[in-house]
Amino acid sequence: MRKLCVILLCLFIGLPARAASLISDTETEKLLTELVAPLAVAADIPDGRLRVHVVASDEFNAFVMGGEDVYIYTGLLQQIKNPSALQAVVAHELGHTLGGHMTQMSARMSAEMTRTMLIQALGIGLMAVGGDPSLGAGVLAGSGGIATQSMLAFTRDEERIADDMGVGLMMRAGLDVNGFIDVFQQMEHMTGVLESKINPNRINHPLTAERLNNVRAQIAKHPDYTPTNAPTDAQNAEYELVRAKLIGYLDNQDAVMTRYPAADVSDAALYARAIARMRSGELGAAHRGTSTLISRAPDNPYYHELMGDIEYQLGDYDASVDAYQTALGLTTDAPQIETALALVLTERRAPGDIDRAISLCKRALLTAPAPLTYWVLARAYDDGRADWARAEYYHMIGKNDIARQYARRARTSLDPASPEYIKSGDILE
């Protein structure tokens, strides 16, 4: 069980208290980055500046922060059935950014609301796209007033504009705009009965049926439009694997087996079941399922990554190291896999393992600094640098008092000219 907890740590990055958790997974992040890249180009965002973050939450939600950071919830990924629909959600969120809606909302709130109403309105404004429409009514219960109605009308208009801009963005990117129709049809299926009982003037989003009709009308204005950059068959297949991976890790085993019954022998089903079985301790079955996946696609690095996880839990460190090394040989820029391999090396401790673990952690930190990587680095060091690495770990997870304790301890034994001494001082300051 201890080893399983470590494997899950490789997947999740804890953020400070009261914040959400981000999932750090090379396979998921690479695919999502590929899918949103055409939208970034269409939105004139410089190459490499649009970053994708995966939020561990069941909410059907996504948002863009600062114009360049896209946050996609696992609940959305688990439910959205094709990449084009996911691209439509991101296009809508970028539509808010391009329309300057957050700035406009701030100005509107300042003009029309008292401090109390401002707090309530922010709660509404951050409601999940496609979420439970009754939440808006619940937040507003008892607040009343002309300012409230004005704000709601304002945000409804913003949502319509963001939909329109999202459709235009998808077309400029050459993507399949029918993804918008897929999203709204799915949302209508989820919330249609509830929305039929709600006063449309008391929520901050237009009703889903209205949004669906609106995007259909927008698309109909361009009868000659043909997608030139729609997701490829390979990306569609990869998307199914990513969804299966998330479901395997995040859902309970019964739910996974219901969604992917034994009769389903697709790669996605085998992937989800192998992960679920690993989580439940059925390591033999997980090993067999993963071996089948590797026999079908020996060049898929993430199947070898999963095998590394399973072998680690089985206690076969040599086989685990071999599997992770194979995975790294089949992909690039994989800091999570580098960290997982470094972790096993710190457990095995064969000649040269510790030096290699330190090298892997340093390389991973250059690509994507993560708490777990500092934690593994602390295990590898046997001097004051271990205290510095622990200080960085606690600093990243928001436990700053503990971080400062380790930083002070590190500075008592480190060379004042060393990078770790200086970085410990940064934590103290």
Image (spheres, rainbow, N blue to C red):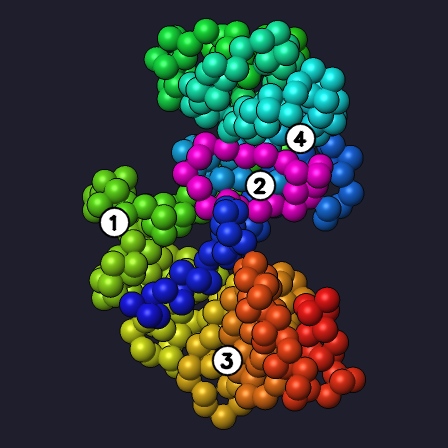
Residues at circles 2 and 1 in contact by the CB criterion of under 8 Å = no
Badge 2 element:
strand
Task: Give the CA distance from mark 2 to mark 3.
Answer: 31 Å
Mark sitting on residue 94: 4
Q: Residue furthest bottom?
A: 351
Pick whichever of labels 1 and 4 is earlier in the sequence. 4
- Which is in the foreground here, disc 2 or disc 3? 3
The answer to whether residue 237 is above or below residue 149 is below
Residues at circles 2 and 3 in contact by the CB criterion of under 8 Å = no
Residue in front for this viewpoint, 428 or 256:
428
- Which is in the foreground here, disc 2 or disc 1? 2
Residue beneath disc 2: 71
The amino acid type of the residue labelled 2 equals Tyr
Identify the magenta region. Answer: 50-69
Mark sitting on residue 253: 1
Q: Badge 4: few (under 14), some or many (20 or more) residues near its Cα, within 10 Å?
A: many
Mark sitting on residue 88: none
Q: Please identify the quarter of the rendering in which residue 152 is found.
A: top right
The amino acid type of the residue labelled 3 equals Arg
Q: Which residue appears at 23% of the width and 40% of the height? A: 258
The amino acid type of the residue labelled 1 equals Gln
Residues at circles 3 and 1 in contact by the CB criterion of under 8 Å = no
